[in-house]
Amino acid sequence: MSNKHTILSALKQSALDQHAMPTIDVVANNDDLVGQFNASLNTVAGTLHSEGGLAALQQAVDELIQQNMQVISLLDGIKGNRQVPETAHDLADIDYAVIPGDLGVAENGAIWVNQPSHRVTPFICENLILALAKDNIVANMHQAVKQVSLQPGELGLFIAGPSKTADIEQALVVGAHGACSLNVYLY
Amino acid sequence: MSELYTASGSKVHAHKADIFCRDETRVDWHSKALWALREKRDRAAGSLPEWEQLRLLGSQLKLHTLSHLAQYLEQFEQQCLSNGIKVHWANDAQQHNEIVHGILAKHKVKKLVKSKSMLTEECHMNPYLERHGIEVVDTDLGERIIQLANMPPSHIVVPAIHMKKEEVGELFHQQLGTKAGESDPLYLTRAARAHLREKFLTADAAMTGVNMAIADQGAIVVCTNEGNADMGANLPKLQLHSMGIDKVVPNMDSVGVLLRTLARNATGQPITTYSSFYRGPQEGGEMHVIIVDNGRTEMMKDKILAESLKCIRCGGCLNTCPVYRRSGGYSYNYTIPGPIGIAVGAKHDDTNSIPWACTLCGSCTYVCPTMVPLDKIIAHHRRLKADAKRLPYGKGGYMPLVGRFMASETLMNTSMSAARLALRVLPGSLLKPFSGAWGKYRELPVAPESSFASWYNKNRSR
């Protein structure tokens, strides 16, 4: 018997009664979604830029480039100074990555990012910039998981703030292995 | 003290706790650090009016999945296969390790970067792979610290919670060449970041645990704050993910519920920094999922023990446990400590003592995001040990007597009045030895004037 069949047949002896799947019907707080999102993003150590839209983002990118930063943009209309390289490892010296966010979640400040070219881009960059449409903010995770797109073969993820750790005496340190800062531009 | 050891040399929980308790300042510090996590959890939970509804939903959807587990596991496998993910099944730890090694050997992997996975700890995978010449690098900061210190995790979410920053500083000075005497967490974290970045960039394969496996998507969800799982999985072309059969959930809606409670209950964060959904390998890459039983189907045969499989490994029960906080993660004779460690590990504990590392206060059950009835499960383990005639250190001798004593009203009443009298007239120094371990850190009680029964008859019984 294969391992799979051994496991599945052992499960036939389960003592658990049958339980129905519950109906997930949780009341959402839809008041001032941008305000809620901003507060949550602060909690997870991210920064929101809600004025100026994509023009403000391009201006910020231009300033970074003037400071000799390596900036890659995966967002249409925003121009960095680095192209997507052949291999993912060549992203190791990227200072800033600009990536489109699909959906924001007001209750926790998380932003859904879908299948960036070179999957490691949002993690390996020193600093991350996400752009998010104001209208694409939902109240909570119940709504978010219904709206995100995750096609077969893809990686999709929620990003809530820069990477962080508190593994040394519970002291919060921002910037563990992933990006050391997160700036979010609303448009 | 020979009764405190088993033939194989393991020590009972109380003995190991005693060692931890020798340094009282450290015990207080440890307890406070964990209680701070519990307080953060309370604030996060309290900020959601629907918190109790989410706990109930979490419990119900896990019970539903567990009661249809074969069906969901098959669906998960089919969906994975159609997404280009390779699926393996392992009955036990040995098979798991062999499968992992087989995949790595086929790809001539020399260096594996790994993110946190309690399952690979449970399977003792690192030493197995190292014996086969593969370098395993734990990449979660806490895990890396204890790996460099050659210690197992002492907590499932914050594995180095027992270490002080000065000790980490000294360890990093020895092993990573950081400045001597430097113990600033920011400095040490940045040093670890630089050290591990080099490992990520040169790894041949990556391995992670699995927080949830989504049956109808054929996708796995991995949650970290540090980004180490994703730095690993997305650089080399080979990614492996090990999961217990209990990690499967039916659909995205289920993930929505559990992601709302997992981090809030673990550290008080609204969500972990990264919640990554892998629904297939990267371009030109290979993705393997190893589904492991290792005793879980056996637990499913017992209706009470089966509920421990609802656990989502947030660690909330450890943080709140008065025994864990004051006895440390190394006092339990199992990889996973604390209440959930007793629930899933009691049968592996050859000292048979960990079900008694509990006051049955129920705090763990109260904070659990999927309502695992931990105190009930722990009490049940005591019953199972008694039924199997495996009561620890002398309990087998005196517990039957205690039972007979408690069941007899006359015996009980007579001896209790004798005890009250003794407490009043005899000096403490004479009585203290009779209180055993209980009296070690406690004063004897002041004897009441009468028994509760006679007080009640006199005052309230009408």
Image (spheres, coloured by chain):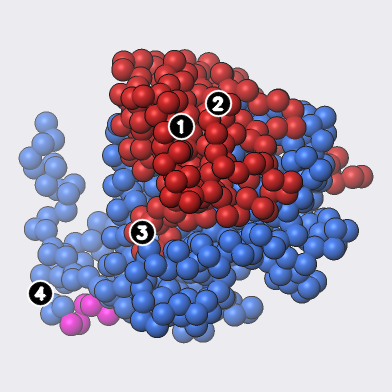
Q: Amino acid at mark 2?
A: Gly
Q: Amino acid at mark 3?
A: Gln
Q: Earlier in the sequence, mark 3 or mark 1?
A: 1
The answer to whether any part of residue B282 appears in the image is yes
Q: Tell which chain the image draws in blue.
A: B
Rendered image quadrant of residue B186? bottom left
For the residues marked 2 and 4, what is the alpha-carbon distance in whole angstroms? 90 Å
The secondary structure that dominates the magenta segment is: helix
Closer to the camera, B73 or A154? A154
Residue at image position (47%, 56%) is: A176
Above/below status of A121 relative to B107: above
Residue A130: image location, x then y, percent: 48, 34
Residue at image position (66%, 26%) is: A150
Residue of label 2: A77
Residue of label 4: B425
Which is in the foreground here, disc 2 or disc 4? 2
Q: Residues within 10 Å of mark 3 (few under 14, many from 20)?
A: some
| Farthest front residue in view | A66
Above/below status of B370 relative to B18: above
Residue A58, disc: 1
For the residues marked 2 and 3, what is the alpha-carbon distance in whole angstroms? 41 Å
Chain ID at mark 1 = A
- Disc 3 is placed on an element classified as loop
Q: Residues within 10 Å of mark 4 (few under 14, many from 20)?
A: few
Residue of label 3: A170
Q: Are marks 1 and 4 on the same chain?
A: no
Chain A, which colour? Answer: red
Which is in the foreground here, disc 3 or disc 1? 1
- Disc 4 is placed on an element classified as helix
